[in-house]
């Protein structure tokens, strides 16, 4: 039997579902380069070098804001992960790749070309709109005449979509995600405490003691550099400080969700109010995010327990369930017709 693979190249994480063992590989979508074009490390190893590497090693993220910014390095890393980590057999394989909806055809084609313009010989390559994959991955039947609202809160993007009868009624890709929260924490620490911290430390603060509403009472000890003395110092950071750093960014996100809700046709809005908003993506892990969204929209929020990889769970269904096969589409016919 031939193998099939569902792939989501996210800004922070590369996720691959493999049909042969039903497992998901999830690695940091990061590559470390030496001598301009030689791969030195990739995935989690490359990420551990981020903000630590000497000048001779360039650590980069080949996907930026949900689209491919560095085709060659993305391709090199993708096939390395497929071969070494997912133990993929590409010859004769069926591939389906998740793509954001609200990007150009040329940007979508770059995802397709990852495989179409490679030396491997897959049997078929298809694309699938990521919000549809997310909804399938959350076990929702997207073919019903029922309005479903999906929010994928990722690292560089947030995709807000309304689905009905297997199609996307509305979709918007916001250039905002967890990475921007990390930056906001870095800025806040500098402004409030004259402390310079790295993005990775900011990310740990957000994931470990952050929250979307006030009231969390945890602390975490970090090391940063004091701007005044120039020396590294240890500091205990409170949850309330992290919350202060990210609250304005989260308020902006809430406003965007509200604006999209205002555009939903009334009959579909009725369904969304009834079943709730479906929230996924790694950043859905911020503590109490659903409480915040419910406060703002008055609509209940369902957070996926598989928030880090609902897209590839959905792609698995597109690959295996005849009912959902049509959600995968080839590219050539669409772009060259
Ligand atoms: N427990 C947590 N609390 C808060 N944020 C979290 C948590 N776990 C993961 N994240 C954040 O989730 C983000 C990664 O999510 P995800 O894997 O969905 O992004 P991506 O698919 O790579 O990005 P994009 O969809 O924007 O291209 C990171 O910003 C990470 O810090
Ligand atoms: Mg994503």
Image (cartoon, helix red, strand yellow):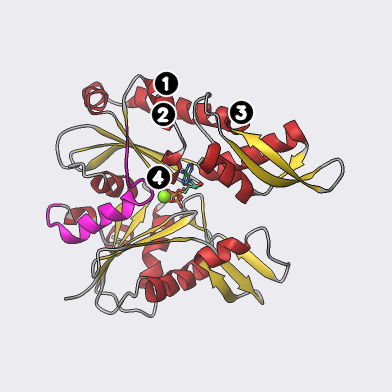
Residue 153 lies, in percent from the top left, at 43, 41
Q: Is residue 173 visible?
A: no
First in sequence, mark 2 or 4: give its number: 2
Pointers 2 and 1 in contact (CB under 8 A)? yes
Residue contact at pointers 4 and 3, CB within 8 angstroms: no
Q: Which mark is residue 194?
A: none
Where is mark 4, residue-wise?
281
Respond yes or no on whether mark 4 lies under 8 Å from ligand 1. Answer: yes
Q: Is mark 1 within 8 Å of ligand 1?
A: no
Span of residues in magenta: 302-323
Quarter of the image with the N terminus in it: bottom left
Q: Which one is nearer the viewer's eye here, 54 or 110?
A: 54
The residue wearing badge 1 is 296
Read off the residue under disc 2: 257
Q: Residue at x 51, y 63 (%)?
A: 44
**Which disc number belongs to residue 244?**
3
- Binning the other alpha carbons within 10 Å of mark 4 as few (below 14), some (14 to 19) or many (20 upward) gives many
Mark 2 element type: helix
Horizontally, residue 135 falls left or right of residue 185, namely left
Q: Position of residue 72 (x, y in %)?
A: 51, 70
Residue 157: say if magenta.
no
Which of the two labelled residues, at mark 4 and mark 3, occupies the earlier sequence position?
Answer: 3
Rounded to the nearest angstrom, the CA distance separating label 1 from label 3 is 18 Å
Q: Is residue 293 above or below residue 63?
A: above
> Mark 3 or mark 1, which is nearer the start of the sequence?
3
Measured Cα–Cα span from mark 3 to mark 2: 21 Å
């Amino acid at each position: 039997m031939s193998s099939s693979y569902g792939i989501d190249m996210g800004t922070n994480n590369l996720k691959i579902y493999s049909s042969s063992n039903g497992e998901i590989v999830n690695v940091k979508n990061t590559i470390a380069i030496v001598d301009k074009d030689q791969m030195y490390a990739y995935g989690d190893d490359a990420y551990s070098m981020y903000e630590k590497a000497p000048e001779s090693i360039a650590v980069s993220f080949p996907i930026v804001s949900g689209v491919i910014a560095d085709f060659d390095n993305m391709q090199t890393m993708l096939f390395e992960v497929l071969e070494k980590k997912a133990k993929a057999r590409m010859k004769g394989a069926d591939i389906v790749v998740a793509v954001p909806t609200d990007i150009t055809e040329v940007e979508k084609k770059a995802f397709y070309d990852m495989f179409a313009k490679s030396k491997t010989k897959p049997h078929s390559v298809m694309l699938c709109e990521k919000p549809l994959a997310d909804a399938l991955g959350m076990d929702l039947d997207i073919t019903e005449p029922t309005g479903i609202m999906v929010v994928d809160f990722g690292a560089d993007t947030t995709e807000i979509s309304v689905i009905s009868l297997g199609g996307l009624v509305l979709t918007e890709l916001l250039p905002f995600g967890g990475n921007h929260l990390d930056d906001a924490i870095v800025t806040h620490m500098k402004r409030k405490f004259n402390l310079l911290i790295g993005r990775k430390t900011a990310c740990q603060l957000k994931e470990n003691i952050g929250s979307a509403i006030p009231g969390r009472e945890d602390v975490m000890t970090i090391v940063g550099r004091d701007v005044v003395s120039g020396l590294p110092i240890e500091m205990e950071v409170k949850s309330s400080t992290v919350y202060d750093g990210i609250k304005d960014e989260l308020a902006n996100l809430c406003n965007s969700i509200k604006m999209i809700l205002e555009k939903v046709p009334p009959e579909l809005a009725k369904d969304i109010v009834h079943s709730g908003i479906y929230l996924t993506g790694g950043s859905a892990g911020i503590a109490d995010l659903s409480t915040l969204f419910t406060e703002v929209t008055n609509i209940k929020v369902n957070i996926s327990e598989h928030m880090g990889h609902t897209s590839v769970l959905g792609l698995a269904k597109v690959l295996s369930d005849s009912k959902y096969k049509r959600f995968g589409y080839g590219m050539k016919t669409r772009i060259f017709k």
